[in-house]
Image (tube, rainbow, N blue to C red):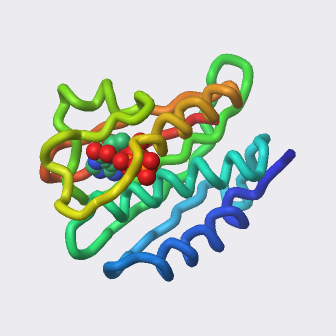
């Protein structure tokens, strides 16, 4: 199904802001305007939802999030590249290779009352790959994280 990224993102962002227990600012930059992706609607919005959820959860008393969407060429086909950047607690380099594993949660450094099952990123990885895509992370402890999906 051809999905307009903007149309999917807008209500998701509203939902997350409403249920958040802290102030949340999310900026969205989509280039080109009106970008679309070929994906299953439910899975695609769950993928974005999980990334936004984490960006909020693993930020301190205020969440500052930037979402960027671009098209990139990979060989002969075009992919959408969507990145979600936060300025939260970050993830130590040696932990980064585990975070996509089922049930894995960073044992130390998580904010005190942050709950979860360690399933969100496993789902993100499984579903992006099922769509012929990929997910990657760049992060630094204390500075924040960027999760990027290509789909
Ligand atoms: P769930 O998503 O199942 O509710 P969860 O958020 O703990 O639980 P994942 O989304 O799979 O699980 O994330 C795995 C772990 O990676 C998290 O427990 C956290 O330690 C770390 N993590 C994920 N996203 C971020 C982020 N944006 N900033 C800092 N740490 C993160
Ligand atoms: Mg999560």
Snapshot quadrant of residue 132: top right
Task: Find residue 23 and report its horizontal and vertical position in percent.
Answer: 33, 81
Residue nearest the viewer, comparing 59 with 67: 59
Q: Is residue 145 visible?
A: no
Above or below: residue 41 compared with residue 98: below
The residue lying at 62 percent from left, 52 percent from top is 46
Quarter of the image with the C terminus is: top right
Q: Residue furthest top?
A: 75
Identify the residue at the far right of this view.
1
The residue closer to the viewer here, 72 or 118, is 118
Q: Along the line of sight, which residue is nearer the eye, 126 or 6?
A: 126
Residue at image location 14% in from the left, 48% down from the top: 109
On screen, residue 43 above or below 10: above
Q: Viewed as shown, does residue 117 lie left or right of 16?
A: left
Q: Could you tell whether 132 is left or right of 135 in the image?
A: right
Image quadrant of residue 58?
Answer: bottom left
Q: Residue at x 50, y 72 (%)?
A: 16
Please state which of residues 23 and 120 is positioned toward the viewer in this rendering. Answer: 120
Image position, residue 112 (x, y; %) = 17, 61
Q: How many marks?
A: 0
Q: Position of residue 71 (x, y in %)?
A: 63, 41
Residue at 31% over, 25% down: 97
Residue 18 percent coordinates (x, y): 50, 82
In this orientation, does residue 60 appear? yes
């Amino acid at each position: 199904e051809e999905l307009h990224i903007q149309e999917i993102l807008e209500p998701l962002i509203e939902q997350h802001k409403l249920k958040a227990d802290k102030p949340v600012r999310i900026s969205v930059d989509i280039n080109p305007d009106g970008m679309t992706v070929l994906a299953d609607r439910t899975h695609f919005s769950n993928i974005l939802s999980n990334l936004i959820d984490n960006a909020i959860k693993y930020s301190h008393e205020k969440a500052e999030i930037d979402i960027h969407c671009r098209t990139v060429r990979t060989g002969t086909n075009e992919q959408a590249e969507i990145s979600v950047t936060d300025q939260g607690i970050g993830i130590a380099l040696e932990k980064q290779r585990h975070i996509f594993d089922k049930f894995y949660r960073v044992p130390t450094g998580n904010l005190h009352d942050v709950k979860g099952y360690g399933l969100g990123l496993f789902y993100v990885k499984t579903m992006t790959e099922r769509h012929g895509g990929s997910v990657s992370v760049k992060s630094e402890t204390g500075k924040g994280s960027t999760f990027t999906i290509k789909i």
